[in-house]
Structure formats: structure tokens, C-alpha cells
Image (cartoon, rainbow, N blue to C red):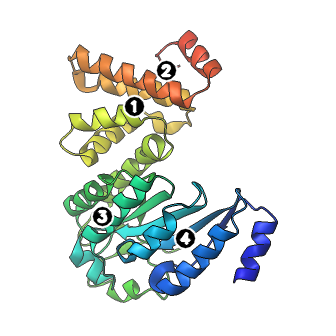
Amino acid sequence: VKSDLSYFIYKRVRQVKFIDRTFNWNMKRCLEIMKYLKLRDNGVTNFHFELCGDLIDDDMMMLLSDARPGLFQFEIGVQSTNEKALRSCNRSSNFQKLAENVKRLMKMGNIHLHLDLIAGLPFEDYLSFRNSFNDVYSLKVHQLQLGFLKLIKGAPIREQIEEHAYVYRSKAPYEVISNKYMSADDLIRLKKIEKLLNLYYNRGGFMRTLAFAETLAETPFDFFEELADFYYSNGFQLKSHGKEDLYRIFYLYADWKGRSNLRIKEKIKELLFEDMKVTLNPDAIKKFLRKGWEIQ
């Protein structure tokens, strides 16, 4: 393994992804490989690992504490915080421990973190998924992926199709359409939320605006649900949008549903401009101001 990795490092490839789904299950092996990668760091190559978040221990934290920013990035599959849903898929996870470890890693500031949620698990209805989303979103990691269950051939979940009334696509990737707990409409709503989560959270550039706008709803999930309703009801999904237009769309959202609070609208406009200044280059901002806040 070290010999193979040294070749990638020598060739200065940009990223190496390990396909182990739980790389730190064998902690001794995991730490030895990470230690080797730190020692041979070429300042360029990034190494992507999928980890069990609740198994990260103090030895790993110590090893990671002085790693070069950008050397490692971690993907942690939370899937759900509904324990019954996790047990049905033969998964066990201590979310409290996972959350503590994620917070420690985020505080260190040198590891890119990507957390995953899966919609369509057994025993998880729309309200339960809302809770899972809010639990994971509160950790404020760099990326939060909202995925959808796929009933791939040979997977144990295939044996539970009748029990949970699964309807799924007949061709690969065999994605769930509905089950006993979530209707097709529920999953479509989550698809829309996924779209807005990717546009405004995962792509970056809206940190200040989102932090404020989330407080206007009961929970972050409710905010993204409303933002998705606005986006789709106005037909913005029918064409692709550049980064600049995403700021204009959000400003229109601030005035949606007849909100008459001018202070809130102006606050959102101010925060959007602050986010723009740290995201777009000066020429793009000048062009934006010439065109104005109306979307063409």
C-alpha cells in the first residue's frame, strides 16, 4: 500500500480516494497509513477517506492536529439520526460521539468534512428525516450531502421490500420512489430541498446570508423547504444559473409571500453583498452592480 501511495505522491496527483467504506474500522492500519501520508506529504495531493465518525479516537485526533490543511478530507456517512432506521439497515452509530468528534475536527480547521444523509430508510418518515437533517446541519460542516436510498441488487434491504412497501426504479441505480413511511410526493419535496442545499450551502458563498435567513424559520430544514418552494414555484429550476443570479434569486426570496418587513429584506441584501465580496472577483461584482438586483 505504501509503495502504491508513494507513486501517486511522486506523480503529484491532485486527489486519491480510498474506497474502504469504513477506513478506520482497523484503527491501527488506518493510523499507520495516515502517518505515512503526513510524512510523505508533497504539498499538493489530497487524500479522501470514508470514516466511521464515532470511532475517531484521541490518537487519530493527535495525528491530524498538525496535518497540512488540504492533505486529508473525510466523508462520514451519518445516513440518519433515527436509531430504529439505522438498526433496520444493520448500522450502529453513536451520534453524540460522532457529533463531538466532528466539532473537534471542525475546530482544528485543517480537515475538509463531508457528511451524508440518506432519505428513504425504513421507519424514517418525513418528520423524522427533518429531525435527522437538523441534527446533522447543526454541525455546520463543509458539505452536507442529501442522498436517496438505492435498492441495489444483492443489498440486504432487497429482502425487506414487501415489509416496508418499497417502490423503486426498475433500472440502475434502483433508487427509491416511495415506501410505507414516505410517499413519492415526500421524496420529491426532499429532491427539491437537495437541489437548494447544493446551490446555496454546498457550493459556498452564502455563509453570512444563510446564518441569518435560517433564523427566520423554525428550523434550518424548514428554511430550505420554503426556499425550495419559492425556487420551484417561480420556475428557476428550468434553466441553469450563474453564481451572480443565485444572489438575485435569494434577494427575491426575501420578499416572497408578501413579507412587509423592509428591515429584514434590506438586512438580507446587505448580507448577500458581504458574501459576494468574499466570493466573487471585483470585476464580477462591478458587472453585477451594473446589471442590478433584478434577474433577467
Residue at x 47% of width, y 16% of height: 294
Nearer to us: label 3 or label 2: 3
Q: Element under label 2? A: loop
Q: Which mark is residue 36?
A: none
Nearer to us: label 1 or label 3: 3
Mark 2: amino acid: Ile
Mark 3: amino acid: Glu
Mark 4: amino acid: Phe
Which comes before the other along the chain, label 2 or label 1?
1
The residue tagged 1 is: 234
Q: Which mark is residue 100?
A: 3
Q: Element under label 1? A: loop
Callout 3 touching callout 2 (CB < 8 Å): no
Which comes before the other along the chain, label 1 or label 3?
3
Nearer to us: label 2 or label 1: 2
User: How far is the residue under mark 3 from the one under mark 2?
Assistant: 42 Å
User: How far is the residue under mark 1 from the one under mark 3?
Assistant: 40 Å
Given residues 71 and 95, the one toward you in this image is 71
Which comes before the other along the chain, label 3 or label 2?
3
Which comes before the other along the chain, label 1 or label 4?
4
The residue tagged 2 is: 295
Q: Element under label 4? A: strand
The residue tagged 4 is: 49
Few, some or many C-alpha atoms within 10 Å of disc 3 (few <14, some 14-19, many ≥20)? some
Callout 1 touching callout 4 (CB < 8 Å): no
